[in-house]
């Protein structure tokens, strides 16, 4: 699977003051919390992260965050097939991957799948929720990350972001 970060401003993105991400090229928008900052990191485009510092049991700093990417699909694939491929890929690529379960949901009015799991990123164990939907020949993927001990506190914010997602085109 070839994943790419959501394109930035040269392809039609704007980020108004209210922290709404709009991509007119891909026809989508979503809102992050006002105080979350947009950052870039080595593992890809991280749209936004909480300014609140959290620390794991080893006192390693972490910020709850979201990553949004899209993927152009080379051939038709069902959402269930995409979910199975994603789970197999994570099991291979992520250290200490522990799958927690799948839920059927919606993203911007389209059928979506939510996968919850634990993984170790560097030296930090995180809980992640990956939400994906397929529209046409493109997959839309959110990954939310939190320390396991602050998951319940961050879940409401993650759900607000997901629920703000709309297809605009």
Image (cartoon, rainbow, N blue to C red):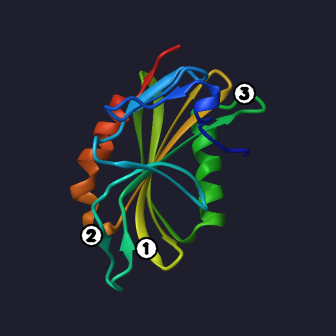
Classify residue 90 as left or right of residue 101. Answer: right
Identify which residue is drawn at 31% across, 83% down: 57
Q: Position of residue 127 (x, y in %)?
A: 39, 63
Q: Which numbered disc flags the more N-terminal residue, 2 or 1?
A: 1
Q: Residue furthest bottom?
A: 58
Q: Is residue 169 above or below residue 134?
A: above
Q: Residue furthest right?
A: 74
Q: Residues within 10 Å of mark 1 (few under 14, many from 20)?
A: some
Q: Secondary structure at mark 2?
A: helix
Q: Is residue 149 above or below residue 101?
A: below
Q: Position of residue 2 (x, y in %)?
A: 73, 44
The front one of 13 and 137 is 13
Q: Is residue 60 above or below residue 134?
A: below
Q: Residues within 10 Å of mark 2 (few under 14, many from 20)?
A: some
Q: Quadrant of residue 83?
A: top right
Q: Residue furthest top?
A: 169
Badge number at residue 76: 3
Badge number at residue 55: none
Q: Secondary structure at mark 1?
A: strand
**Which one is closest to the eye, mark 3 or mark 1?**
1
Badge number at residue 149: 2
Q: Which residue is mark 1?
A: 125
**Which one is closest to the eye, mark 2 or mark 3?**
2
Q: CA distance from mark 3 to mark 1?
A: 34 Å
The front one of 169 and 39 is 39
Q: Which numbered disc flags the more N-terminal residue, 3 or 1?
A: 3
The front one of 141 and 36 is 36
Q: Quadrant of residue 94?
A: bottom right
Q: Residues within 10 Å of mark 3 (few under 14, many from 20)?
A: few
Q: Secondary structure at mark 3?
A: loop
């Amino acid at each position: 699977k070839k994943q790419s970060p959501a394109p930035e401003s040269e392809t039609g993105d704007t980020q108004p003051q209210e922290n709404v991400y709009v991509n007119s090229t891909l026809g989508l928008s979503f809102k992050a919390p006002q105080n979350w900052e947009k950052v870039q990191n080595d593992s890809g485009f991280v749209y936004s992260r909480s300014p609140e510092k959290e620390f794991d049991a080893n006192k390693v700093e972490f910020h709850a965050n979201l990553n949004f990417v899209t993927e152009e699909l080379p051939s038709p694939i069902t959402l269930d097939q995409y979910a199975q491929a994603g789970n197999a890929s994570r099991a291979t690529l992520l250290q200490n991957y522990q799958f927690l379960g799948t839920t059927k949901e919606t993203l911007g009015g389209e059928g979506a799948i939510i996968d919850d799991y634990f993984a170790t990123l560097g030296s930090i164990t995180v809980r992640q929720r990956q939400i994906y939907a397929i529209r046409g020949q493109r997959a839309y993927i959110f990954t939310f990350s939190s320390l396991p001990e602050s998951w319940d506190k961050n879940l409401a914010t993650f759900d607000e972001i997901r629920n703000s997602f709309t297809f605009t085109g």
